[in-house]
Amino acid sequence: MAALHSKATGGRRASPQALARYGAFPSNTTWYITGGQWPQSPNPPPSSGSDSDDELFALTSRVRVNKKTGKYVTKERKVADGVGTPPPGYTGNYTALIAKTTDGGVTWEKQYYDTGRFYFNQVSCASETVCMAVGEGFADDGSEAPGVHILKTEDGKTWNEIYVYGAATGGSALAVQMLSATEAWGAATGQNGAAMLHTTDGGETWEAPQQDLKYVGDVV
């Protein structure tokens, strides 16, 4: 992961606590970058098989990938009774950032920044101004608003939360994909298994049918 730097900020990080994670590139010069971090456990998540801790890369708060074999290791998330306070020994906090450039990365504008609730995963655009971004937060490590959070911009400037999934069931989502300005899919996981989130009205309403899968990671 890389920190977002910009000539507009003298080459400094746009936010030292929100590392760049995913990007959407609706044109040659207009790009959106999502970023964020999550509270860090004092103990690495349990691995399976012969995976050693130094072989695992944290793709998300829940998913690790073995850097040698490419195998994924998933951390089971518990649904905590309380929210907003990380367990003893945890360091850091949830941060979520969206930044945009309209000149191919020469300068950047920070459009959205939040702390304490979730971090961002994928961002997807139907045009230079209509985009969605998905984030996730977990109660068991201190999220003030656990679950899947989908945000949308319709003017390329202002981001609004349009949907929350799995707030009480450990909702998690890595991916969102816009097919048009009105239709989008999301890949979500919770205590009840995987769900494919789907909207055909620009995010005003969503369907979330359960799938015969324990986890789902991406949608293309």
Image (cartoon, helix red, strand yellow):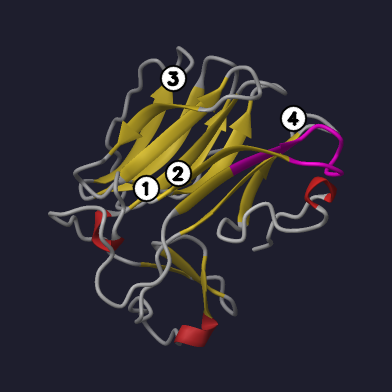
Tell me residue 54's x, y (percent): 52, 86
Mark 3 touches mark 1? (CB < 8 Å)? no
Q: Is residue 100 magenta?
A: yes
Comparing labels 4 and 1, the label whose residue is closer to the camera:
1
Q: Which residue is identified by label 3?
A: 203
* Cα–Cα span, label 1 and label 2: 9 Å
* Cα–Cα span, label 3 and label 1: 21 Å
Q: Which residue is identified by label 2?
A: 135
Instruction: Determine crowd level at label 2: few under 14, some 14-19, many 20+ residues with C-alpha closer than 10 A.
Output: many
- Decide which of tag 4 and tag 2 comes sooner along the chain: 4
Q: Which residue is identified by label 1?
A: 117
Mark 4 touches mark 2? (CB < 8 Å)? no
- The residue sitting at 38% across, 79% down in the picture is 44
| In the image, residue 208 above or below residue 114 | above
State the mark number for residue 133.
none
**Does 149 sit left or right of 35 as displayed?**
left
Comparing labels 3 and 1, the label whose residue is closer to the camera:
1
Q: Quadrant of residue 41?
A: bottom left
The span picked out in magenta is 98-108
- Decide which of tag 1 and tag 2 comes sooner along the chain: 1
**Given the current orientation, which residue lies at the most extreme top position?**
201
Tell me residue 212's x, y (percent): 28, 44
The C terminus - image quarter: top right
- Decide which of tag 3 and tag 2 comes sooner along the chain: 2
Amino acid type, mark 3: Gly
Mark 1 touches mark 2? (CB < 8 Å)? yes
- The residue sitting at 45% across, 15% down in the picture is 200
